[in-house]
C-alpha cells in the first residue's frame, strides 16, 4: 500500500503541514503592636493553608473517583507502570515496533518524552526535545489532527533528525486530547496535552486508516490516564507541601472540627502541651488536650462562635506564656462553622524582657539618683559654709567625692548611650591605637582599689607583652565592668586579679575573683541585656543595671574578639575571660564586618 494511496483514503493527511513541516504562523517586633501584626500574619497564613488543604481534599476526592483513572495510579512510579502496560497494548494492537508519548511543556514550549517509551532507548529519548511547532509531531499538536506517514525519510513534513535518530520507516501521530463533558455527557471543552506516535509497522507493512482510528481511541484513553493521574499526583504533592508547612511553622497550631475532633496538631503545639509529636488526627480533643486553658479556649470558641485572643500560661510558675488567637473556619456556601484554628505564639521571652526592662528602669533611676544625691548634698554643704567651718583638706575631700560621683554618672550615661547604639543597629566606632596593657591594667587596678578595703586588686602582665592595637576607651570600659563586677560579687573581700597573656595572634585577659560565683541556671544568660543574678538571697542586695556584661560582649565583638565565663562555682568565685586580636581590622574583615 503506497503512501499516496493512504493519503487519498485519509482526508486528514491531505490537510497535513506544508513541505518542511512548518505550520503557518514582609516598629519593633517585640512591641505589643508588632506582636499583634505578627499574630495577624500567622492567622492569615494558617487560614489560607487550612482552606487550601480543604480544597485540595475535595479535589483529590473528585479526582480519585473518575472512572477514566485506574485506582492504582496515585504516584509517579505507579503512573509509569500503568503507561508501560498501555504502550505495550498499543504496540500489540497497532502492530508497531515503537511507541512514543510526547507531552507539551508550557514553560519551555517543547514537546518532551513522557516515559516509558517502547522500542526507544533512554539515551535516544534524552535527545528528543521537539519544539511545539516543528515536524509532524508539532503540526499534529498545533492542529489537533492525526497524520499517517509511510515514507518517513522522504516525507517533507518529517524531522530528519528524529527520523535518523529513531530509525523510523513509517508511523502515525495522533493528538492527546483531554475532553470534558457535563452531566449529560455533552462535550463542553477539550484540550491537547501532547501527541502519541507509533513507528515502524511490523512485517514491513504500511499503516492504514483503521490503524489511525484505533490509535485515536487508545490515545484518548491514554490522555485521560495521564491528565487525571498527574492532577492527582500534583494535588497530593501540594497537600503534602502544605502539611509540611504546618508541621514546620514555628508557632503552635491546633485545628479542631465542630464535633471537637482534632484535624491537626503540629509539632510546635505538641511541644507546647508536652505531648509526643504525632498520632492525634481524628481523636477527640478531650482525650488529647489535658491543659485546661487551651481546651477551654477551643471549646468556648466553638460554643460561642466568636473568635478570641488571650494570653495563656502553661507550666509551673508561668514557665511559658503564649499569645493565643482563634479563627473560625466556615463553609463558603452556607457560612456554617466547620472548625476552629488556634494559633499559639510563645511570648515568654518578650514578657521576660518587658519585666527586665521595668526592673532596669527602676534600677537605672536608682543608679542615677544615688550619685546625684551625693553631689547635691556636698555642693549644698560647701555653698552653705559661709563661716569657713570646713578646712581646705575637708573641702578638697568633698570635691574629690563630687568628682568621683560625676565620673560614675558619666560611665553610666556612656554605657546607656552605647546600649542605645547597639539596640538601634548602629556600630560601635573604634578609635584604634597601640595600647600599653601593663600601664592600662595597672591604672584600672589602682582606680578601683580606693573604693574597697576588703579586696586586693592586682594586675599581672608579662614584661615582654607587646602593645595591643585597640580602642583604649572601650577596652577600659570592658575591664572596668569586669573588675567592678568582680568586686561587687565578692562582698566578703578577697583577691581580684587582672591577668594578661600572649596567645599568639591575640591577647587574653582574665579577671578572677573569690566571690559568690554564678549559679548554673544563670550562666547561659549572663550576657543578655538587663539580666541580673538577683533570685538568690546572696545576690539580692548587690544591685546593678544588668547591662554591664551585655555591653562588654558587644565591645569585645566590636574589636573582633570575644568574652566568656571561663569558670564559676557558687561560693568559690568566677573567672571572666576576654580575647582580643592583635590586628582587629584584619579580624573584622575576615569575619565580614
Image (tube, rainbow, N blue to C red):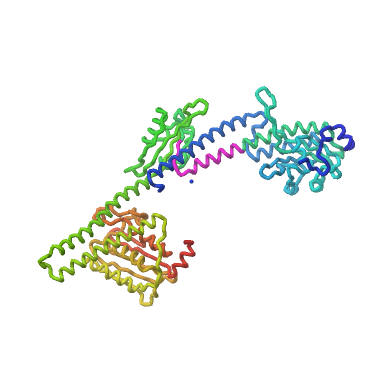
Whether residue 247 is in magenta: the answer is yes
The answer to which of 430 and 168 lies nearer the viewer is 430
Residue occupying the far bottom of the picture: 464
**Residue lying farthest top?**
184
Q: Quadrant of the N terminus?
A: top right
Q: How many marks?
A: 0
Rendering quarter of residue 481: bottom left
Q: Could you say which quadrant of the image residue 93 lies in?
A: top right
Q: Nearer the viewer, residue 489 or 369?
A: 369
Tell me residue 483's x, y (percent). 30, 65
Q: Nearer the viewer, residue 280 or 3?
A: 3
Q: Which residues are magenta?
A: 234-254
Residue 263: where, in percent of width, then height? 48, 34
- How far from the left and from the top, in percent, is residue 518? 31, 57
Residue 456 drawn at (x, y percent): 25, 69
User: Compared with residue 411, is residue 465 higher up or lower down, i.e. above or below?
Assistant: below
Residue at left offset 21%, top offset 67%? 400
* Left or right of residue 125, residue 585 in this image: left
Q: In the rendered view, tell whether residue 373 sits above or below residue 110.
A: below
Residue 13 belongs to the span the image colors magenta: no
The answer to whether residue 98 shows anywhere in this view is: no
Q: Residue furthest front?
A: 386
Image point 32% across, 61% down: which residue?
414
Which image quadrant for residue 410? bottom left
Q: Main secondary structure of the magenta part?
A: helix
Residue 259 in view of the camera: yes
Q: Describe residue 25's horizontal placement relative to residue 359 as left or right.
A: right
Amino acid at each position: 500500500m503506497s503512501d499516496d494511496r493512504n493519503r487519498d483514503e485519509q482526508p486528514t493527511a491531505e490537510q497535513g503541514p506544508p513541505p518542511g513541516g512548518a505550520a503557518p504562523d514582609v516598629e519593633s517586633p517585640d512591641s505589643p503592636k508588632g506582636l499583634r501584626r505578627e499574630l495577624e500574619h500567622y492567622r492569615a497564613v494558617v487560614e489560607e493553608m487550612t482552606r487550601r488543604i480543604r480544597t485540595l481534599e475535595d479535589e483529590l476526592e473528585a479526582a480519585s473517583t473518575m472512572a477514566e483513572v485506574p485506582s492504582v495510579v496515585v504516584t509517579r512510579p505507579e503512573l509509569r507502570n500503568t503507561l508501560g502496560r498501555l504502550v505495550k497494548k498499543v504496540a500489540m494492537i497497532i502492530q508497531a515496533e515503537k511507541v512514543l508519548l510526547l507531552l507539551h511543556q508550557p514553560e519551555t514550549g517543547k514537546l518532551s518524552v513522557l516515559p516509558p517509551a517502547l522500542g526507544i532507548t533512554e539515551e535516544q529519548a534524552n535527545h528528543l526535545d521537539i519544539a511545539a511547532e516543528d515536524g509532524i509531531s508539532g503540526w499534529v499538536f498545533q492542529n489537533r489532527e492525526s497524520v499517517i506517514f509511510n515514507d518517513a525519510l522522504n516525507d517533507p513534513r518529517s524531522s530528519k533528525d528524529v527520523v535518523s535518530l529513531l530509525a523510523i520507516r513509517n508511523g502515525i501521530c495522533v493528538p492527546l486530547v483531554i475532553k470534558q463533558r457535563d452531566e449529560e455527557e455533552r462535550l463542553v471543552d477539550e484540550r491537547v496535552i501532547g501527541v502519541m506516535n507509533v513507528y515502524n509497522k511490523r512485517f514491513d507493512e504500511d499503516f492504514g486508516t483503521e490503524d489511525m482510528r484505533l490509535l485515536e481511541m487508545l490515545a484518548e484513553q491514554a490522555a485521560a490516564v495521564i491528565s487525571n493521574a498527574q492532577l492527582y499526583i500534583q494535588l497530593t504533592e501540594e497537600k503534602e507541601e502544605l502539611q509540611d508547612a504546618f508541621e514546620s511553622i514555628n508557632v503552635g497550631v491546633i485545628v479542631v472540627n465542630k464535633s471537637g475532633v482534632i484535624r491537626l496538631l503540629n509539632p510546635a503545639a505538641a511541644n507546647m502541651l508536652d505531648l509526643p509529636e504525632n498520632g492525634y488526627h481524628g481523636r477527640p480533643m478531650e482525650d488529647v488536650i489535658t491543659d485546661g486553658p487551651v481546651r477551654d479556649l477551643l471549646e468556648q470558641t466553638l460554643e460561642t462562635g466568636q473568635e478570641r485572643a488571650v494570653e495563656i500560661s502553661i507550666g509551673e510558675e508561668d514557665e511559658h506564656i503564649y499569645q493565643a488567637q482563634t479563627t473560625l473556619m466556615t463553609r463558603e456556601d452556607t457560612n456554617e462553622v466547620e472548625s476552629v484554628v488556634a494559633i499559639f505564639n510563645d511570648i515568654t521571652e518578650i514578657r521576660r524582657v518587658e519585666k527586665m526592662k521595668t526592673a532596669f528602669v527602676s534600677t537605672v533611676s536608682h543608679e542615677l539618683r544615688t550619685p546625684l544625691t551625693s553631689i547635691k548634698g556636698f555642693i549644698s554643704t560647701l555653698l552653705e559654709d559661709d563661716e569657713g567651718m570646713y578646712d581646705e583638706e575637708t573641702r578638697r575631700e568633698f570635691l574629690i567625692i563630687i568628682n568621683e560621683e560625676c565620673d560614675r554618672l558619666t560611665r553610666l550615661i556612656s554605657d546607656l548611650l552605647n546600649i542605645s547604639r547597639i539596640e538601634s543597629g548602629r556600630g560601635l566606632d573604634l578609635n584604634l591605637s597601640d595600647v600599653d596593657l601593663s600601664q592600662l591594667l595597672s591604672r584600672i587596678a589602682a582606680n578601683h582599689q580606693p573604693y574597697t578595703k576588703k579586696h586586693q586588686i592586682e594586675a599581672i602582665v608579662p614584661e615582654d607583652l607587646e602593645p595591643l592595637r585597640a580602642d583604649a576607651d572601650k577596652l577600659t570600659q570592658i575591664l572596668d565592668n569586669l573588675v567592678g563586677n568582680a568586686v561587687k560579687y565578692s562582698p566578703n573581700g578577697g583577691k581580684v586579679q587582672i591577668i594578661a597573656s600572649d596567645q599568639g595572634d591575640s591577647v587574653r585577659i582574665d579577671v578572677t575573683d573569690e566571690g559568690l560565683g554564678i549559679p548554673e541556671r544563670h550562666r547561659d544568660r549572663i550576657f543578655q541585656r538587663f539580666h541580673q543574678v538577683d533570685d538568690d538571697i546572696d545576690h539580692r542586695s548587690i544591685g546593678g543595671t544588668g547591662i554591664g556584661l551585655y555591653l562588654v560582649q558587644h565591645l569585645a565583638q566590636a574589636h573582633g574578639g570575644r568574652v566568656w565565663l571561663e569558670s564559676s562555682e557558687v561560693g568559690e568565685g568566677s573567672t571572666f575571660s576576654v580575647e582580643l586580636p592583635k590586628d582587629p581590622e584584619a579580624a573584622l574583615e575576615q569575619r565580614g564586618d
